[in-house]
Amino acid sequence: MSLTNAGGLPECRILAIETSCDETAAAVVADGRHILSNRVASQIELHRRFGGVYPEVASRQHVLAIQTVVEDALADASVAHVRELDAIAVTHGPGLAGSLLVGVNLAKGLAFASGLPLVPVNHLEGHVYSNWLYADSSSVSDSPGPGESNGSAGGSASDSARRQGSGSASEQFPALILIVSGGHTELVLMEGHCRYRLLGATLDDAAGEAFDKVARLLELGYPGGPAIQAAAESGDASRFHLPRPLTRPGRRTERQPDAQASSLPTILPVRGEHRFNFSFSGLKTAVLNLMRQLEREGTEVRQTQTAADIAAAFQMAVVDVLVGKTADAAAEFGVKQVCICGGVSANGLLRRAAERHFARIGLPLHCPPLFLCTDNAAMIGAAAYYRRSFLQSRQHASMGQRHGQDGEAVAQSTPHDRPIEPSGRDFLDLDVYASLPLVDSMQR
Ligand code: ADP
Ligand code: MG
């Protein structure tokens, strides 16, 4: 392991902890980009029988798993003692209160005992920075969860999954970020590290939530995203037409002959204030109404080819909307790169459709490798590194301003100066409903 980075600065290694929902995760990340270890204990098997995350069960399972997961992450990264590291990062929101509490309290305890600074991380900012991690991750391991080793989206975190995805976005700003997870669907303009403007968000259900609910209606299994994707593989997306909410017909591209692989949107966003907003609850209702109509006509839906066809039509509708609005925002704001992140970014059709569109117009597109799409701690370590640097440079700038006024030297900021950010371990509270820390909201 190198002790200095490319800039000749001492390597900055952060232990990151993530327990916002149903994954108990810990990782060690160097310089915000290199994954030295990444452990995820998934609770999918525990929650499967409830068809969704059962919050109290989740927090209890975090309590049982967290110590082993952190110890394993440290051992994988050859860290003998926490004191060898530079900081401890933890997700403090948004998320389930009981789940967040487990990670936050452990992180506070470790910071207090070791004297290391504590960096609170917004979970959504974590997803954003999953695209800044280098995809090569030989040290990535799965901590066995109860009953199953790993529940990462799109299958397990197998070697082949680890190799997928480009990862590593560049320093090209502005960048357009599409966050699509179980709890959030947001289009964000990233003007620099840690500087965001919200362009639009879902008005009701998140995209992942819609996948989960429709999978439940079709009795395809849990979690819904991978189940819909698997069913859609043998489905005919053109048998049923489902609505594309908050869009209008457009002529951006012709649909490709291979309907499953293409899904280049023939739609454009609605005009006006909802141009970059999303709405998925009506789409879910449309699926329900379609199922009722088919059943009234005597067509068996569940466990049949019809379920696969509906899954394919639903997936196509969601992808059309996501890619259509992302493409439109990218053109409007003249961005230099596009990043997609969050659990739904594991969706194969979404990745292929976005890749095809942005390759055609020559705009770099980044999607995390599959094992970094759903919740993990490596992304929290990456976000912590950039946020810490951002806060430090702001701190130095304001110090410099004061010194400059006194005629003294203006302080230079480096990412490795101490003391770090003002929000130290004494100040760390949960922020269950946190949204991405915005420069300014810009709803259109
Ligand atoms: P959150 O941060 O909201 O807790 P994650 O970022 O872990 O959630 O994403 C979980 C969501 O991603 C779930 O709604 C799940 O159905 C969805 N998801 C996972 N894999 C896929 C996939 N292959 N296709 C579509 N959705 C997926
Ligand atoms: Mg998440």
Image (spheres, rainbow, N blue to C red):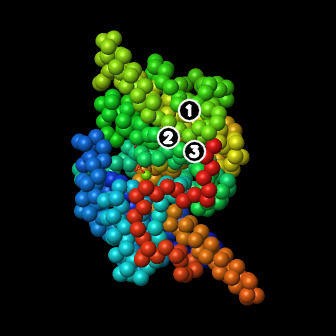
Query: In the drawing, does residue 140 fall left or right of residue 222?
Result: right
The reply to whether dot 3 and dot 1 touch (C-beta < 8 Å) is no
| Vertical placement of residue 245 versus 406, above or below | above
Residue 246, disc: 1
Task: Say which residue appears at 46% left-offset and 53% top-offset.
Answer: 372
The reply to whether dot 1 and dot 2 touch (C-beta < 8 Å) is yes
| Of residues 188 and 444, the one drawn nearer to the viewer in this rendering | 444
Q: Residue 100 at what x, y percent from top left? A: 36, 61
- Mark 3–mark 1 distance (CA, rounded to whole Å): 12 Å
Q: What is the crowding at mark 2: few (fewer than 14 residues within 10 Å), some, or many (at least 20)?
A: few
Q: Earlier in the sequence, mark 3 or mark 1?
A: 3
Question: Which three-letter amino acid code belongs to the residue tagged 1?
Answer: Leu
Task: Say which residue appears at 63% left-offset and 73% top-offset.
Answer: 393
| Vertical placement of residue 186 versus 242, above or below | below
Residue 200, disc: 3
- Mark 1–mark 2 distance (CA, rounded to whole Å): 10 Å
| Of residues 154 and 213, the one drawn nearer to the viewer in this rendering | 213
Circle 1 — which element? Answer: loop
Task: Say which residue appears at 64% left-offset and 36% top-offset.
Answer: 272
Q: What is the crowding at mark 1: few (fewer than 14 residues within 10 Å), some, or many (at least 20)?
A: some
| Of residues 325 and 25, the one drawn nearer to the viewer in this rendering | 325
- Mark 2–mark 3 distance (CA, rounded to whole Å): 9 Å
Task: Say which residue appears at 49% left-offset and 73% top-offset.
Answer: 423
Q: Earlier in the sequence, mark 1 or mark 2?
A: 2
Q: Residue 44 at what x, y percent from top left? A: 30, 48
Circle 2 — which element? Answer: loop
Residue 388 shows in the view: yes
Query: In the drawing, does residue 257 fall left or right of residue 334?
Result: left
Question: Which three-letter amino acid code belongs to the residue tagged 2?
Answer: Leu
Question: Which three-letter amino acid code belongs to the residue tagged 3?
Answer: Gly
Question: Which residue is the site of mark 2?
Answer: 203
